[in-house]
Amino acid sequence: MDRQAKIAKVKKNPDGDITDVMLENGNVYSINEAVMMAKDGLIAGVNVGQAKNGREYLRSTPNETSTDNLDQLPTF
């Protein structure tokens, strides 16, 4: 398997929810596609969480720094 891709940038809706992600290679995926990719182990540094309403979402894998949290990444 190739090296896992990392999320470089995110796109947010007016509510501040992440709707799309851009990987280091410039490819853009909807959040739903990115969730499926993360489940398949294709994206590094994230895991899949589940909201109370059952919707799945991406979250940063917990570590010692907040600078790589998805909400802290640059937007596109």
Image (cartoon, grey):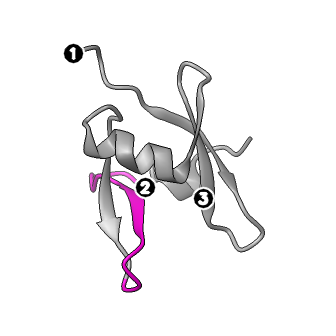
Which quadrant does the C terminus fall into? Answer: top right
Please identify, in this view, whether the residue under mark 1 or under mark 3 is nearer the observer: 1
Question: Is residue 56 toward the left or the right of residue 8 in the image?
Answer: left
Marks 2 and 1 close (CB-CB < 8 Å)? no
Mark 1 closeness class: few <14, some 14–19, many ≥20 residues within 10 Å: few
Amino acid type at image mark 1:
Met
Which quadrant does the N terminus fall into? Answer: top left
Label 1, secondary structure: give it. loop
Pointer 3: what residue? 18
Mark 2 closeness class: few <14, some 14–19, many ≥20 residues within 10 Å: few
Instruction: Please tell me whether residue 25 belongs to the stretch shown in magenta.
Output: no
Pointer 2: what residue? 66
Amino acid type at image mark 2:
Ser
Q: Which is nearer the N-term, disc 2 or disc 1?
A: 1
Residue nearest the observer in this picture, 22 or 29: 29
Q: CA distance from mark 1 to mark 3?
A: 27 Å
Query: Residue 4 placed where, x, y %?
Result: 32, 25
Mark 3 closeness class: few <14, some 14–19, many ≥20 residues within 10 Å: some
Please identify, in this view, whether the residue under mark 2 or under mark 1 is nearer the observer: 1
Which contiguous range is marked in magenta? Answer: 52-65
Question: Is residue 49 toward the left or the right of residue 53 in the image?
Answer: left
Which residue occupies 28% across, 14% down? 2
